[in-house]
Each structure stands twice: as structure tokens, then as C-alpha cells.
């Protein structure tokens, strides 16, 4: 809610009382939106006066969008219009293009709407509203085009229980034992460091450990996360995982291992690669691991 000096001060006895609010009271909504396959995103703002009388109903509002960072303004449109009638929404729309387009480039951009409320002899009141949500890049492996994402959002990597039941069972038990990745409060963190990924795999699934026929060793948290066993903790497993020398444990540190079918393991590898590419997951980005139908 936007509150802009809504009421004129009280007048002493013998002077004329006020004839209305100067600017009234307002509700404001601002939001941005984009697509991981496009170098352009939008930033909209909507304003509605919900209280005011007298002079307040004569006010007009306009806006201008500006940028700061690796981008340029493609369009900014919020022409001056009357705030009246009450409870009617006035829309401003802007679009921005990233300038992080060269190969390997990564850029952030902050976008700002500055609103001006003008009311005759009362002058003009200005307020600014800023969003800094989008990161754009031409650095995502497997993506031939530039795109933009909200990097702080932990997107869900969803494995199908019907397609890979053994994988789903292992991850479910691993998360229930306390390992992270299921929630926004405890997501996994992408790593693209080859040495970290190799160490995660070697510690959770030693190469000299025997595998039953048709089985492959699966580790959780996934090796492509910074929360793998290279980050500390102990190895754990569960009944039916065919690793009899490793105990079951609980806690947020460490990693679990389980022998699952090769087909489930191959499915997981394909899902991981597709997810990282589709979501433009770069090193350090958070994500969740969920089990679907």
C-alpha cells in the first residue's frame, strides 16, 4: 500500500477547513516476468486510489521506467492519467533487454519505476519502486540463445516415481533421514566444479565397491551439488540398498548411497542435464529435488 501525505493538516479556529485530501491513499502492485529462452523481460506496475475526496480526485499520475546494470530500456509506457474514479487501476508497462549477450556473459539488471502524482497547486510528489530480480546469461551449457531467470528461486527438479521407482525410494528415504534438498529453506546448491563433483561421487560411491548385477550406485545429495559428501559428514545407506558395511544414519550433513537399477540411474542423469539446461542453472544456484507421480 502506498501512502502519500493523504490529509491536509488541521486548521486553527477561524480559518477555512480543508476541502479534501491532497493525494489520497493508494494500493500499488509491481511485478516482473520473463522467460529462460528470451533476452527480454517485463516490469509492470499498477496503482489504484481507494480513498480520497475533494482535491484528491483531481490528481493525475504518470510514470517512467529506468534501469541500472547490464540492460537497456526497450519500452516504458505510463502516460499521465487521472486517478479518479476510485478503485480503478492505472497500468504502467516496461520492457528491458539484456546486454549480456556475448559468449560466456552473465549480467544483472535493476529496474525502477518512478511515479509522479500531480495535483494543481499542491505540486508533484514522486515515489520510486525498484526490482532487481533477473539474471541473464549466454553461459548456460547447451543453450544456444540468451535468456533470463530469477536466480534466487529454487526451481524443482522432479523425478517420477512411476518411471524410476528405485531412485524415488532412495531419495525419499535420504531426505527423510535429514539430508537437504526438499524445501526452500534447505535447497541444494548447483556446482559446476569438476573436482567437487568427482569427489562427491568417489566418496559416496567408491569405485572399488561391488555392484550387484544390473545395479548402479546412486548418491544423494546428487554429485552436482555443493552439499555432497565433499562438504563433510558421513556416508549412510538404508535397508535393501545392498551396501551392508555402511550403517543408517540421520542428520543434515553427509550423503547416502544406494544400489539402484541402471535404468533408473540413466534416467536420473538425463533429467539432471535437461533440468540444468532448461532452468539456466549456473554455479551457486539453489534448487529443490522432489518426487512426483
Image: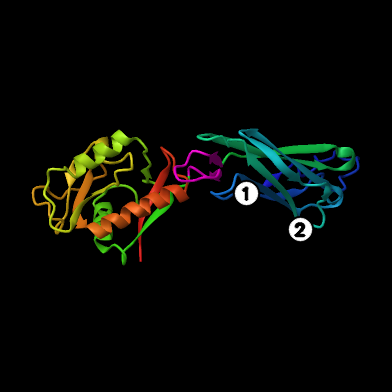
Q: Is residue 151 left or right of residue 161?
A: right
* Cα–Cα span, label 2 and label 1: 18 Å
Q: Secondary structure at mark 2?
A: loop
Which residue matches tag 1? 31
x then y, percent, for residue 254: 23, 42
Query: Residue 36: percent from the left, percent from the top?
Result: 53, 49
Q: Quadrant of residue 190?
A: top left
User: In which image quadrant can residue 119 be found?
Assistant: top right
Q: Is residue 194 visible?
A: yes
Taking the spot 69% from the left edge, 48% from the top edge, the residue there is 45
* Residue at 32% over, 36% down: 194
Which mark is on residue 54? none
Q: Which residue is mark 2?
A: 88
Q: Is residue 39 above or below residue 160?
A: above
Secondary-structure class at tag 1: strand
- Is 191 included in the stretch rendered in magenta? no
Amino acid at each position: 500500500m502506498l501512502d502519500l501525505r493523504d490529509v491536509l493538516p488541521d486548521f486553527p479556529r477561524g480559518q477555512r477547513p480543508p476541502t479534501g485530501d491532497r493525494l489520497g491513499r493508494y494500493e500499488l502492485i509491481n511485478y516482473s516476468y520473463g522467460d529462460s529462452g528470451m533476452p527480454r523481460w517485463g516490469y509492470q506496475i499498477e496503482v489504484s486510489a481507494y480513498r480520497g475526496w475533494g482535491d484528491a480526485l483531481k490528481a493525475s499520475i504518470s510514470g517512467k521506467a529506468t534501469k541500472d546494470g547490464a540492460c537497456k530500456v526497450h519500452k516504458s509506457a505510463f502516460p499521465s492519467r487521472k486517478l479518479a474514479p476510485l478503485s480503478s487501476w492505472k497500468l504502467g508497462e516496461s520492457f528491458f533487454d539484456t546486454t549480456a549477450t556475448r559468449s560466456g556473459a552473465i549480467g544483472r539488471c535493476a529496474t525502477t519505476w518512478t511515479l509522479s502524482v500531480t495535483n494543481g497547486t499542491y505540486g508533484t510528489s514522486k515515489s520510486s519502486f525498484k526490482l532487481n530480480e533477473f539474471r541473464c546469461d549466454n553461459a548456460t551449457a547447451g543453450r544456444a540463445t540468451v535468456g533470463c531467470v530469477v536466480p534466487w528461486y529454487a526451481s524443482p527438479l522432479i523425478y517420477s516415481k512411476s518411471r524410476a521407482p528405485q531412485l524415488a525410494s532412495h531419495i525419499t528415504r535420504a531426505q527423510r533421514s535429514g539430508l537437504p534438498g526438499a524445501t526452500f529453506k534447505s535447497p541444494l546448491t548447483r556446482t559446476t566444479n569438476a573436482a567437487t563433483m568427482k569427489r562427491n561421487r568417489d566418496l559416496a560411491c567408491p569405485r572399488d565397491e561391488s555392484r550387484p548385477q544390473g545395479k548402479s550406485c546412486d548418491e544423494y545429495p546428487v554429485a552436482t551439488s555443493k552439499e555432497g559428501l565433499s562438504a563433510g559428514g558421513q556416508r549412510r545407506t538404508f535397508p535393501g540398498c545392498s551396501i551392508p558395511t555402511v550403517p543408517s544414519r540421520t542428520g543434515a550433513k553427509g550423503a547416502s548411497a544406494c544400489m539402484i537399477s541402471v535404468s533408473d540411474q540413466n534416467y536420473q542423469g538425463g533429467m539432471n542435464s535437461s533440468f540444468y539446461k532448461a532452468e539456466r542453472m549456473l554455479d551457486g544456484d539453489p534448487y529443490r529435488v522432489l518426487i512426483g507421480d
